[in-house]
Amino acid sequence: MTEERTAESSGQSGRAQSIAPPPSIIWALAIALVALIVYVSRDFVLLLFLSGTVAYFVNPIVKVAESALIKRSIAVTVIYLGIGLSLLATAYFLFPRLRTEVNALSSSLPFFGDRLDEAIDALQNEIVSRYPAADRLFTPREVRNDKLNQFIEQQATNFPGLVSHLVSLVLAGVLVPFFSYFFLRDSRKIVHFVLDRLPASHIETSVAVWCEIDRIVGQYLRGLAIEGMVIGVVAASGLWMLGINYPLLLGVLSGVANVVPYLGPILGGTAALLVTLVQFKSLTPLAQVFILYLSLKLLDITVVQPMAVGRGKELHPVLLIASVIVGGHALGIVGMVIAVPTITILQKIAKLLLERRRYSTQTAENRLSTHVQTQPYVC
């Protein structure tokens, strides 16, 4: 009787083991569930991402303060106060000039459509006078006005959505510094909390993965900030030298928009070309501004990006473009910004995990054959 029960229990355990899914399917389902949760709560995830971005910018300064034997919580508090005072001082000196340009632009907006029509007509007449065959390429002013009115009506229907986005931006401006402060202050506690709950066999690999994520994200975000500041300063200086209106405002727009891969430089250049067209109504200044932004893009690709960001060395161009398209479709402009570091991190983590698996297999074989213990990987 006992033997029958033993056989029956062993049969049940064998059937349970055969029914249990393989680990790869479990991991795939877990990853799909996490991706679904992230997509559903993407607004909160983006808020956390922006907070982490600010924390990465400030973290090197915190490390310097810690090297001077200053307690981390005190260092973070003092640094945040210093950053706040610095921003207030910068706003005190730059805001009057920026406010003057914004007021001048806002006062001219009611007449912007008429001035743009006049500028386009003058530009068409200039081109036709030089190249008469180009007359058939231009549309009449009435057709152009109809298309412009349709575009304005479409944007007017999206006004409630624009207001909600503005409210979200104001809320993010309040919550991002709050969250980033606690990220910086408690970052080590968070890492230790996670590592203490991992199996001992996975701690080394987890530390290596975390070090790789920290390296890639920190390098990318700090480099992106440097790139935006360089592009903004050079664009503002070039526009000021060419005598274009609102050089500071256009420079800030160019620097901020440059963080969006591919689309950002087009937005900044288009805004500068529109201002130039309305101001001069001539082809020569337009050509000068176009050459300025083309030179700026070449400078960015050949000098600024390799030195500051180095993103061209991390991803294949096809994979980079695909990640930007998918990120923009999923999360909009912010998705386009975070697509590059995200896919780079996933690529590096996959490569690191495969190397660790290959290393573990080789280590086990070496221990069986030579009984010599190999030194483990240390991040």
Image (cartoon, rainbow, N blue to C red):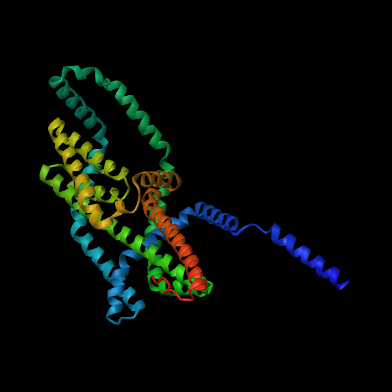
| Image x and y of residue 144, in percent | 30, 25
Looking at the image, which is closer to me, 247 or 206?
A: 206
| Image x and y of residue 15, in percent | 74, 60
- The image quadrant of residue 74 is bottom left
For residue 155, above or below residue 364: above
* Residue, far right: 1
Could you tell me which quadrant the C terminus lies in?
Answer: bottom left
Q: Is residue 178 visible?
A: no
For residue 259, above or below residue 281: below
Q: Is residue 109 visible?
A: yes
| Image x and y of residue 172, in percent | 40, 58
Looking at the image, which is closer to me, 347 or 39?
A: 347
Q: Give the left or right position of residue 165, taking residue 244 as reference.
A: right
Q: Give the left or right position of residue 108, taking residue 344 as reference.
A: left
Looking at the image, which is closer to me, 201 or 147?
A: 201
Q: Give the left or right position of residue 241, taking residue 257 as reference.
A: left
